[in-house]
Image (cartoon, grey):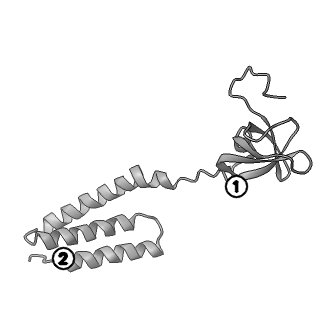
Amino acid sequence: MQIVLEPWHWFVLGIGLMLIELVIPTFAAIWFGLAAIMVSILYWIFPWMGFATQVVTWTILSILCTILWFKFIKPLSIDKTKAGLPREATIGQIGMVIQTGLNHEQIKVRFSLPILGADEWVCRTASSVQVGDRVIVTDILGNDLLVQRYSSNPSSPQQGK
């Protein structure tokens, strides 16, 4: 008995596997579905492919799609906001002063990576800083970040003043 599949069989299998991803969000079935759709296209272009060739092609394409996902695409989805991280992860972050002269020695600081979900913060500082100065987070006081002027040179007298 010989198994005969048509290109639309592979296409329906691919769509079905991708729809399963909606119910079981593991991000694994989508790659098997994408590989099945690719086999459907290849089988449509090369109709002399045998069943064993189709299954081997589907297996290889499934593995390749999964490897490519973990190697190249998934790293792009890493959360770099530092939201939900402990206090120790926030202390030491460096930002730039973008506004001074706010109430009660407060300044507005922009951080290159969002801290606790926001990239701009109204901060408190005990030292004199100007717009454009780099500052470092030294403490968290309630809802405010405490910052001080930062210098990349550790022996600089500016840091800690």
| Amino acid carrying mark 1 in the image | Ala
Nearer to me, 118 or 65? 118
Expressed as whole percent of the image width and height from the top left, the position of residue 89 reads 69, 43
The circle drawn on residue 141 is none
Please state the total of marks drawn on the protein image. Answer: 2
The circle drawn on residue 118 is 1
Nearer to me, 59 or 77? 77
- Quadrant of res 105: top right
Above-or-below relation of 86 to 129? below
| Residue at figure coordinates x 72%, y 29% from the top left | 151
- Is 111 displayed left or right of 106 in the figure? left
| Residue at figure coordinates x 40%, y 76% from the top left | 19
Expressed as whole percent of the image width and height from the top left, the position of residue 84 reads 69, 54
Q: Earlier in the sequence, mark 1 or mark 2?
A: 2
Q: Which of marks 1 and 2 is in front?
A: 1
| Residue at figure coordinates x 72%, y 44% from the top left | 90
Quarter of the picture containing the N terminus is: bottom left
**CA–CA distance in space, label 1 to label 2:** 50 Å
Nearer to me, 51 or 111? 111
**Disc 2 on helix, strand or loop?**
helix
| Amino acid carrying mark 2 in the image | Pro
**Disc 1 on helix, strand or loop?**
strand
Quarter of the picture containing the C terminus is: top right
- Quadrant of res 134: top right
Expressed as whole percent of the image width and height from the top left, the position of residue 106 reads 86, 47
Expressed as whole percent of the image width and height from the top left, the position of residue 132 reads 72, 40
Above-or-below relation of 14 to 123? below
In the displayed orientation, state which residue is furthest to the top: 155
- Is 117 displayed left or right of 14 in the figure? right
Instruction: Give the residue pinned by disc 2.
Output: 7
| Residue at figure coordinates x 74%, y 32% from the top left | 150
- How many C-alpha atoms fall within 10 Å of the one at disc 2: few (<14), some, or many (≥20)? some
